[in-house]
Image (cartoon, rainbow, N blue to C red):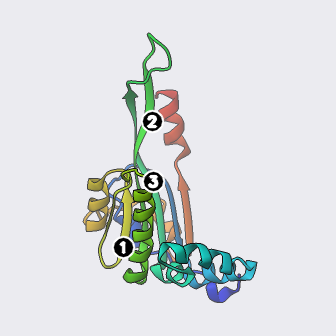
Amino acid sequence: IPSKYMGSSLNMDMIKNIPSQDVFGLLAVNFKPAGLVEMIKLTGADGLVNSFTQQMGFNLDDVGKATNGDLLLAFSDLKATSDSAAPAPGFSAAFPGMNYIFSVGIGDKASLQKILDAVKKMGANSGEDSMIHYVMNDKTFAIGSSPAFANEYLNGKSNHTYDFADKFSGHPAGFYVDIHKILSFFSGS
């Protein structure tokens, strides 16, 4: 990818707005959306992609315009949850539960809305009610483990600091996993 499509600095506000101090996994990226569109065009798949997406009410240009290039995926609050579906009679099942947030910065709200409308239409055509709930304002689109968690993220009042965040500042991407926290959970410590 040519350097003109490389991202700049991460949007650190996206990280500090995570509504939990107990983050155990995070991926944050800043990219130029035009680079994504250009990569699809270089593969020669743009015609196929446009043919498919136009039937749904948007096109490849809408995909490139929908985001400003800020992306975040974070996992927090690892905890055990029980489930009524035990593996066998007499056994109880405990599964990991967690909160998550997936967020993208909005570039062009009208283009993003076309994509969201297409996704809703696909869900309606399949006869299923969507289990995914999203929230957005003029700058940010977010999907969370619950509507409350996503709304708290979007409100931006958390202002958390994390030890790893200083290492991300000024870079176009950052990845963090707290292996110790994950292993401690599974070992029961």
132, 29: nearer the viewer: 132
Q: Which residue is mark 2?
A: 96
Q: Residues within 10 Å of mark 3 (few under 14, many from 20)?
A: few
Give the percent coordinates (x, y) of residue 177. Answer: 54, 51
Give the amino acid at mark 2. Pro
The residue type indicated by label 1 comes to Thr
State how far apart marks 2 and 3 are (Cα): 29 Å
In this figure, which residue is indicated by the disc labeled 3?
126
With 48 as the anchor, is 63 left or right in this view?
left
Q: Nearer the viewer, mark 2 or mark 3?
A: 3
Per the model, the C-alpha gap separating discs 1 and 3 is: 28 Å
Look at 45% across and 14% down and name the residue there: 91
Taking 17 as reference, is 81 above or below it? above
Say if residue 7 shows up in the picture: yes
* Circles 1 and 3 in contact, beta carbons < 8 Å: no
Q: Which of the 4 quarters of the picture holds residue 16?
A: bottom left
Q: Position of residue 33 (x, y in %)?
A: 55, 81
- Secondary-structure class at tag 2: strand
Category of crowding for the residue at label 2, using alpha-carbon neighbours closer than 10 angstroms: few (below 14), some (14–19), many (at least 20): few
What kind of residue is marked 3?
Ser
The total number of labels drawn is 3
48 w.r.t. 175: above or below: below
Q: What quarter of the picture does the N terminus occupy?
A: bottom right
